[in-house]
Amino acid sequence: MPDFDEPAEVVEDDYNEEPPAEPKSKLGDIWQLGNHRLICGDSTDPAVIDRLMDGVKADMVFTDPPYGMKKESEGVLNDNLNFDELLDFNRQWIPLTFGALKDNGSWYCWGIDEPLMDIYSEILRPMKKQKGQDKLTFRNLITWDKGSGQGQLSEDLRMYPIADEKCLFVMMGVQGFSDNADNYFEAWEPIRIYLKQERDRMGWSNADMKKMCGHSPTSGCHWFDKSQWMMPTEEEYKTWQHHAKGEGFKKEYEGFKKEYEEIKKEYEEIKKEYYSTRAYFDNTHDNMNNVWHFDRTSQEERKDTGGHATPKPIALCGRAIKSSSREGEIVLDVFGGSGSTLIACEQLNRKCYMCELDPHYVDVIIERWETFTGQKAVKLN
């Protein structure tokens, strides 16, 4: 078990059991795995998701649906759908996950290029328009760089070999604290008006003042307008004083800088309160960007996940979970597969609410968790 007094890192659990020939679990079963909930059911069925969530909302959705990669024979249910059928399938489960997500939650969905483009253009963008422009914010299309792709240097291939998977990352709500004129903090007004009056007194233009300070004419220096207003630096202000030769900008910088700092404290408190209602995001726990470098799971490692065809590395799951949820919060995964999201949540002290359609893999998830924790799952119905 991890030591939660130390910074949480995730490790592979080395589970190495095949799913049983005859599953013990059956459709409709709900299991409690410590702090986690697991249901054997169809993620396109609203009643299944309602039973799984049991009246609570998730802080984050992190899920890996079928891609249409023809891997049903390897245990990935609904993976033989063509892309048109897959889009219809995605139209059924995606709204249910947003319905189970908090108004300030984050949503991650893995896939390959064409199905993900369909999800964004055909499902998420229309949802955004229905909910209003302030209810859904696209953040990233994350790339999982797996290294090499099958068919490199092959004369038979008529496209670039694929060496990645993608992940759509969106947040609920408006995510940036806008400094435009509509959201201008009126407490700045005495300082802004003073600066504007002194500029007008001297008959200077904005371009004149940028040139005095050695700034480019196209630089974004918003010293006088409400939109994106900015406090001049001491060096800039004293440059203007020098050019004014006692005719303007007579206040000492230290005086109104102190006034600015007092106002700024109030402004920062307002920003802090604003961001407390936005989707959580921690960009500091790892040195990362929108391209993630993780080795793909090997054939041997797939045995550690009950032989599942498409398991995600636990460290990859952990990166997203640490970035978009706090300890103790709920992560929803409606395509549980071999349970990698749940094992990552166990290690990172999050609560995973998981749905998996295949009873065989429900058994794998339970056995995997029990092996990792030494605890026993409890059937709730």
Image (cartoon, rainbow, N blue to C red):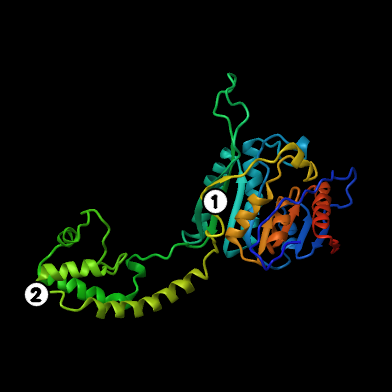
Q: Position of residue 123 (x, y in %)?
A: 56, 49
- Mark 1 Cα-neighbour bin, 10 Å: few <14, some 14–19, many ≥20: many
Position of residue 316 in the picture relative to residue 199 (left or right): right
Q: Can you identify the residue that label 2 sits on?
A: 247
Quadrant where the image shows the C terminus? bottom right
Position of residue 115 in the picture relative to residue 364 (left or right): left
The amino acid marked with disc number 1 is Leu
Position of residue 127 in the picture relative to residue 30 (left or right): left
Place residue 68 in its image quadrant. top right
Q: Position of residue 141 (x, y in %)?
A: 53, 47
Q: Can you identify the residue that label 1 sits on?
A: 124
Residue sitting at 35 percent across and 68 percent down? 182
The residue positioned farthest toward the top in the image shown: 155
Position of residue 146 in the picture relative to residue 273 (left or right): right
Per the image, label 2 sits on a secondary structure element best described as loop
Residue sitting at 71 percent across and 50 percent down? 335
Residue 241 seen by the camera: yes
Say which of 318 and 138 sits in front.
Answer: 318
Q: Select label 2 or label 1 by which is in front.
A: 2
